[in-house]
Every structure is written in C-alpha cells, then in structure tokens.
C-alpha cells in the first residue's frame, strides 16, 4: 500500500505581480506577505521527496498544482504513480486510483496550522505561526514558520523564495523526517475554470469521511 507521505505532511503535519526589484530587496517574510496579498491564484509544477533521519530518500514524486484563494487547490501527483488531492474550499478530497479510495475531510481540519495554510490560504498567519527570517542559501531567501499548535504534526517548515516566488519548502516532521518540495514553472493569477477545484468521487470507489 503506497501513501503520499509528502503531501500528507504538507497538508496535515503538508506565487507575484509585485515589482521584482522591490521583492529582491525584501526579506523572505515580506516576500511571503506580498505573495499572499498579490497572488490570488497560480499554477505550476512540483517535485517532492521525503528524507529520513539517516539521510536516505524515498523515490521522488512529481506533478502539477493549482490554487485559488482562499483554500481552493489541486495537487496532482503524476509520477511514479497517480494520486489527486483537491479542495473546493470546504472539503478536501484525497483520491488514490490504485486503491479505489477517496478520503474526505473538512478544509479546516485538513489545513489548519499547516504549510498549505501559508501557500493556499489568505489573511494573517500570526495566529497559527511564528515566522522569522533565515540566512540566504542555495540562491534563495529563506523564512521559517513554526506552528503555534503543539499538535500540528510538524516542527517547522522553511520556505525559500526566488524572484518573489516560493521555490522550495523543507518540512521537518515530528519524527525527524524532512519533506522537500520544489516548485517550478509558476504562473501567477491565471484565469482558472470554474470547475478546476470541484471533485466528484468516481463510481465504485470507497469514500471515507474523516
């Protein structure tokens, strides 16, 4: 049984129209604020990989994502197998075609104080996170978001920005494992179809409501 651990940690545990020169001069927390206020929707590609405490990595996953604030998003794993996570702003559906199973949760229950709330939510993050600047590395400007809740499922998530766009997330979970997510080919504020974030479970699959 395979589990999309990277995205589960990204959601449960788991970009800008601003002037580039102004964004480059700003520290990562300010770039995050610009991203939240000025980018209301986006599409792009991702790769993600989990690395254990010994530095051993699981096979990388890749796919496409899209989102529209507040709380609507699609995270579609294409390789090495397909899996789909969709939020319509009220419910989050996780569909595994191989298992013929859909897991359904409330958005607040699924996102809450998670990295998904940073990227896909809206409004102030102060109630859920302590956010601080980190030194630049790998050509990116970094910040650290630490959840205020003790049961968030992760210790912190570091987010690296490049050219005012989030380019990498590194999430440390409660078991000492790191999930790295790289974002690329991001298009900000595209016009998205009305049905982009709707989901109807296929006939014959099991639907598990959490």
Image: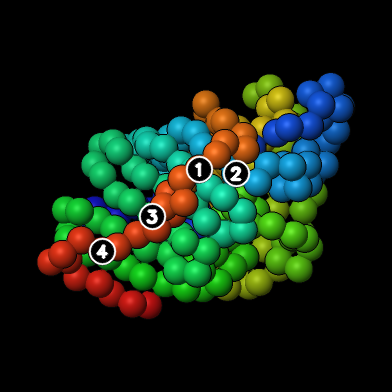
* Label 4 to label 2: alpha-carbon separation: 24 Å
* Label 3 to label 1: alpha-carbon separation: 17 Å
> Pointers 2 and 1 in contact (CB under 8 A)?
yes
Give the mark, 4 or 1, whose residue is nearer the N terminus.
1
Q: Which numbered disc, 2 or 3, marks the residue closer to the eye? A: 2
Give the mark, 4 or 2, whose residue is nearer the N terminus.
2
Q: Where 26 sits versus 192, above or below?
A: above
Which residue is the site of mark 3?
Answer: 85
Give the mark, 3 or 1, whose residue is nearer the N terminus.
3
Which residue is the site of mark 2?
Answer: 41
* Label 3 to label 4: alpha-carbon separation: 12 Å
Residue 166 sits in which quadrant? top right
SS category of the residue bearing label 3: strand
Which residue is the site of mark 1?
Answer: 192
Q: Where 159 sits versus 124, above or below?
A: above
Circle 4 residues within 10 Å: few <14, some 14–19, many ≥20: some
Give the mark, 3 or 4, whose residue is nearer the N terminus.
3
Q: From the image, which quarter does the N terminus lie in?
A: bottom left
Circle 3 residues within 10 Å: few <14, some 14–19, many ≥20: many
Expressed as whole percent of the image width and height from the top left, the position of residue 146 reads 69, 58
Q: From the image, which quarter does the C terminus lie in?
A: bottom left
* Label 2 to label 3: alpha-carbon separation: 17 Å
Residue 23 sits in which quadrant? top right
> Which is nearer the eye, 191 or 125?
191
Give the mark, 2 or 3, whose residue is nearer the N terminus.
2
Circle 2 residues within 10 Å: few <14, some 14–19, many ≥20: many
Q: Which numbered disc, 4 or 1, marks the residue closer to the eye? A: 1
> Pointers 2 and 3 in contact (CB under 8 A)?
no
Which residue is the site of mark 4?
Answer: 201
């Amino acid at each position: 049984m395979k589990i999309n651990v990277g995205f589960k940690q990204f959601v449960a545990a788991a970009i800008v129209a601003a002037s580039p020169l102004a964004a480059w001069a700003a520290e990562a927390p300010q770039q995050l604020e610009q991203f939240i206020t000025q980018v209301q929707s986006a599409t792009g590609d991702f790769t993600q990989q989990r690395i254990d405490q010994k530095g051993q990595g699981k096979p990388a996953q890749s796919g496409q994502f899209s989102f529209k604030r507040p709380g609507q998003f699609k995270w579609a794993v294409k390789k090495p197998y397909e899996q789909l996570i969709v939020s319509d702003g009220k419910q989050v559906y996780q569909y595994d075609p191989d298992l013929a199973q859909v897991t359904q949760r409330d958005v607040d229950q699924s996102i809450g104080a998670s990295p998904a709330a940073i990227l896909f939510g809206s409004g102030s993050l102060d109630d859920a996170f302590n956010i601080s600047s980190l030194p630049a590395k790998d050509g990116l400007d970094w910040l650290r978001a630490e959840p205020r809740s003790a049961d968030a499922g992760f210790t912190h998530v570091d987010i690296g920005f490049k050219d005012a766009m989030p380019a990498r997330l590194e999430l440390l979970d409660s078991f000492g494992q790191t999930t790295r997510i790289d974002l690329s080919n991001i298009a900000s504020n595209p016009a998205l179809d009305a049905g982009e974030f709707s989901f109807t479970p296929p006939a014959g699959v099991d639907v598990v409501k959490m």
